[in-house]
Amino acid sequence: MSHLRFLLPFLLLSGALSAQGIQFEHTTFAEALNKAKTENKLLFMDAFTTWCGPCKMLTNQTFPDSAVGAYFNEHFVSLKMDMEKGEGIELARKYGVEVYPTLLFFQPDGIVAHRAAGFYPAAQFLQLGETAQDPKRNLYALETRYRSGDRDRPFLRQLIDARAAAYDPRAAALAGEYLDQETDLNTPENKQIILRFANDPTSKAFKFLVQNRKAFEPQVTEGEVTQFISQVFQNYLQTNPTLPPDKVQTLYATCYPEQGEKAASAYRLMYYQERSDFKNYTVSAVDHFKRFPTENPDELNEAAFLFVENTTDKAMLEHARTWAAKSVALHENTYNQLTLAKILAKQGKKTEAIKAAKRSSELGKATGMDNAQAQLLLKQLGQ
């Protein structure tokens, strides 16, 4: 009975520690790694920042879980490290920590056996720990197999998922390599990989998605497919800002086969305008409005205004006059009447120019818009 009195507090303490969840070391990285080596365990490091929401969720919801505590306290030495303070800054650089939380599992020799990122509920976090412990399934083992030349298809899918869980940008490259070798992209597994990783609009997988949208609808809606295509397209343009018009035209045709040529033509106008290349802009604008007539008065007026400000070519000015006149007919306002007046003045049609400038001034005054430019033009025309 006396022995039980002494033993009972230790049993209660042991149970309390498990109930408290993961017991983190309060020491340096080197000391924690040395302890892991002494105890023949992996070192688990929670790489966090104080401002990270998912980091706080792990701390408040997952780490205190009793089952998580029991498993991790038995199999790992655990350490929390603020990656923006002290030695955490150098550790973040050394181990390429760029997203938070990053969950690192080290072998006793300091090699990263496994890594993941983001928030994990308790059940999934336990699975993560088990994977890290498994010398056949952890990321280090998978990468070793890949470097040895293993290209088994199920294995590659497993490695893609492992890299993605670690927020490793190489996951997308591997997915592209995998999909390029597939003869049948229309399998559930391959369609899922396409939806997750086909971020290159020039790839075989992305073109398959665009050409077979309906095939993806059991997994996602038509709207989600359209949104994914648009996102890939916009991201590609943003990361390749100097893409020449002919390449952009091909890109539009790939992403939007129904309207690609019109969109590419509109992009050419924007491309030349941004670079103040008005010689090519004027030629492209004439071609654009000939092939794709518009009923948008603002679009017509903008093109006509750019012409009158940047060219003296008689033929080009006549195109601009036609657009400005159509803009006025569609929706008259002070701006398109002013554009028309400037074009007429540049063409030497003074009487018509004065009439349009006066009308622009009247519309501006009536609608509370600035009519100073119209008044200035009238003054230049001797009024």
Image: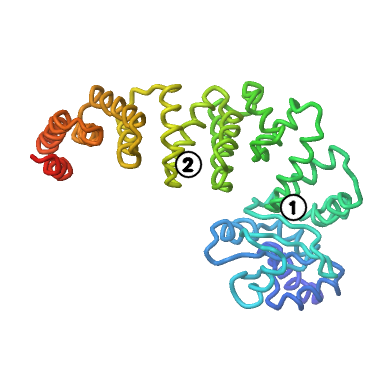
Is the residue marked by circle 2 packed among few (<14), some (14-19), or many (20+) residues within 10 Å? many
Asked if residue 9 lies left or right of residue 342, the reply is right
Identify residue type, mark 1.
Leu
Q: Residue at x 13, y 33 (%)?
A: 354
Quadrant, the N terminus: bottom right
The numbered mark, 2 or 1, whose residue comes first in the sequence reads 1
Q: In the rendering, at what x and y percent does residue 189 appear?
A: 75, 32
Q: Which mark is residue 128?
A: 1
Name the residue nearer the viewer: 156 or 372.
Answer: 372
What count of labels does the image hold? 2
Name the residue nearer the viewer: 74 or 167.
Answer: 167
Is 35 placed above or below 148 here? below
Q: Residue at x 69, y 35 (%)?
A: 194
Asked if residue 182 lies left or right of residue 56, the reply is right
Is 288 placed above or below 39 here? above
Q: Which mark is residue 2?
A: none
Quadrant, the C terminus: top left
